[in-house]
């Protein structure tokens, strides 16, 4: 059965048809290394921004490491977008550090680049500006709050200006009108000497120049007060007097400082750190240099008031003296009465002294007699006499006792000699003893063969028993 023709309305043709040939396989591209990709991105990015670009946003995440570089993030205030910014130390100025605070609006110029070690997009900046009046004031307020918290603006640290300054130092531009105004007012009011320490008061490097000029004036020993000032100008012209280094230099100055920056409506941080603030440089000179004419007039009035006061005081003292003299009476009578009382007391004192001396003399004599009796020489003499008496008595007693003992000894010696065995031996008798020293008194005390000792008058005989023949006792 023949097949039906294909329906042209169908999306697919199911009729029997030869399929087309497959395309030849394409070779896969070589994969890039991470470093190659980073270099490609960096090259493309830097080629697109050859001349750099200005970027405006809000500063956040500020980091200031010891290396001196500045790292922060610039955020878009309307959209969720941010970019990292790097300010190298060689491009950083003190004003940039002031502007680089969290939350400030800033305008930054730099070149976008891709930092390969972290795979991060960042902006290498070389310039930084405040984005409008509001951001600058915000940064200034933050710096002001910081310095105030450290006590640099405290009223208890303010020092009074000297009344008679010898030398008034001035830190300002040598070509401006400030130094001429100060000199004119100072010469008109008195004889203070003016010492100018020239400084750059606006533009790049102005803060360092002001600090250097302040340091030079402080090395002069005769400088008693310093005026820091400049004429009026825009906020950018006065920016150097809002720098942190300048404010700290003014606060730590050796002598009192008068701030005369701009006009009366201009306010800088130096005004808060200085010991006194003047609306104009001329007013600063009037504050630092006393008016000799005014001092002379004040001295004249003071002398007049003092003369009148002294005269009035003398009149009052004279009246008081008259009244006191009347109440006191004749002083000679008072002196005579006191002299009489003094004489009586002197007599009583003399009598008491005499009585006391006599009593003390008697006591002393008694003590001397007792002391003479107890004197070592008297005591030794008495003891020597007593010792001689006892010695004589002892010699007599010992002689009597020795004679008596001698007589007793002679009597005992005669009796002992009469009873001595030696007397018996002298008559021809002998004493026999055994080896252990026992006397042989009977036949039973020795046996045949034993050795015996025989003592005669003048010898000791060693013998041996041959035989023991007992003898019959006589009846």
Image (spheres, helix red, strand yellow):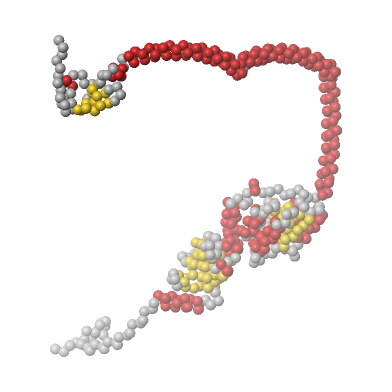
The percent coordinates of residue 316 (x first, y second) are 83, 28
Name the image quarter holding the C terminus: top left
- Number of numbered discs: 0
Which quadrant of the view contains residue 167? Answer: bottom right
Identify which residue, 322 or 238, lies in the foreground.
322
Which quadrant of the view contains residue 315? Answer: top right
Q: Is residue 136 visible?
A: yes
Identify which residue, 324 or 375, lies in the foreground.
375
Q: Which residue of the protein is positioned furthest toward the top in this rendering?
A: 475
Q: Residue at x 54, y 15 (%)?
A: 387
Q: Residue at x 83, y 43 (%)?
A: 299
Which quadrant of the view contains residue 55? Answer: bottom right
Q: Which residue of the protein is positioned furthest toward the front in this rendering?
A: 428
Q: Is residue 231 visible?
A: no
Q: In this rendering, is residue 341 above or below 183?
A: above
Q: Residue at x 83, y 31 (%)?
A: 313
Identify which residue, 292 or 20, lies in the foreground.
292
Name the image quarter holding the N terminus: bottom left
Q: In this rendering, is residue 432 above or below 100?
A: above
Judge from the rendering whether residue 346 lies leftward or rightward of residue 207; answer left or right. right
Judge from the rendering whether residue 131 lies leftward or rightward of residue 431; answer left or right. right
Q: Residue at x 76, y 48 (%)?
A: 163
The percent coordinates of residue 240 (x first, y second) are 65, 62
The percent coordinates of residue 186 (x first, y second) are 79, 55
The percent coordinates of residue 271 (x first, y second) are 67, 54
């Amino acid at each position: 059965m023949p097949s039906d023709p294909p329906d042209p309305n169908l999306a697919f043709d199911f009729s029997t048809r030869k399929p087309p040939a497959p395309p030849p396989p394409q070779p896969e591209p070589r994969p890039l290394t991470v470093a190659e990709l980073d270099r490609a991105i960096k090259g493309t990015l830097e080629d697109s921004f050859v001349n750099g670009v200005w970027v405006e946003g809000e500063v956040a995440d500020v980091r200031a490491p010891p290396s001196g570089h500045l790292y922060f993030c610039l955020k878009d205030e309307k959209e969720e977008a941010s970019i990292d910014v790097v300010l190298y130390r060689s491009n950083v100025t003190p004003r940039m550090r002031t502007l680089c605070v969290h939350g400030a609006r800033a305008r930054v110029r730099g070149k976008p680049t891709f930092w390969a070690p972290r795979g991060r997009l960042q902006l290498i900046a070389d310039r930084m500006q405040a984005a409008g009046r509001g951001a600058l004031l915000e940064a200034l307020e933050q710096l002001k709050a910081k310095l105030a918290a450290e006590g640099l603006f405290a009223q208890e640290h303010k020092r009074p200006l000297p009344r008679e300054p010898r030398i008034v130092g001035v830190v300002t531009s040598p070509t401006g009108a400030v130094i001429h105004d100060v000199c004119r007012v100072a010469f008109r009011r008195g004889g203070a000497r003016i010492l100018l320490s020239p400084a750059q008061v606006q533009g790049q490097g102005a803060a360092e120049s002001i600090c250097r000029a302040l340091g030079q004036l402080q090395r002069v020993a005769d400088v008693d007060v310093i005026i820091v000032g400049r004429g009026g100008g825009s906020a950018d012209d006065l920016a150097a007097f809002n720098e942190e280094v300048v404010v700290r230099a003014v606060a730590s100055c050796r002598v009192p400082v008068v701030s005369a920056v701009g006009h009366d409506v201009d306010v800088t941080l130096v005004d808060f750190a200085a010991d006194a603030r003047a609306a104009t440089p001329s007013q600063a000179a009037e504050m630092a240099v006393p008016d000799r004419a005014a001092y002379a007039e004040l001295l004249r009035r003071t002398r007049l008031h003092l003369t009148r006061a002294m005269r009035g005081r003398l009149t009052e003292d004279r009246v008081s003296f008259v009244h006191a003299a009347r109440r006191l009476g004749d002083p000679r009578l008072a002196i005579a009465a006191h002299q009489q009382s003094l004489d009586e007391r002197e007599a009583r004192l003399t009598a008491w002294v005499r009585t006391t001396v006599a009593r003390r003399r008697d006591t002393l004599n008694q003590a001397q007699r007792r002391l003479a009796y107890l004197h070592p020489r008297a005591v030794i003499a008495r003891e020597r006499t007593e010792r001689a008496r006892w010695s004589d008595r002892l010699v007599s007693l010992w002689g009597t006792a020795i004679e008596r003992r001698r007589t007793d000894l002679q009597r005992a010696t005669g009796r002992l000699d009469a009873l001595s065995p030696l007397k018996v031996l002298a008559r021809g008798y002998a004493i026999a003893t055994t080896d252990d020293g026992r006397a042989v008194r009977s036949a039973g005390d020795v046996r045949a063969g034993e050795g015996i000792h025989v003592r005669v008058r003048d010898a000791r005989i060693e013998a041996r028993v041959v035989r023991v023949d007992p003898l019959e006792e006589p009846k």
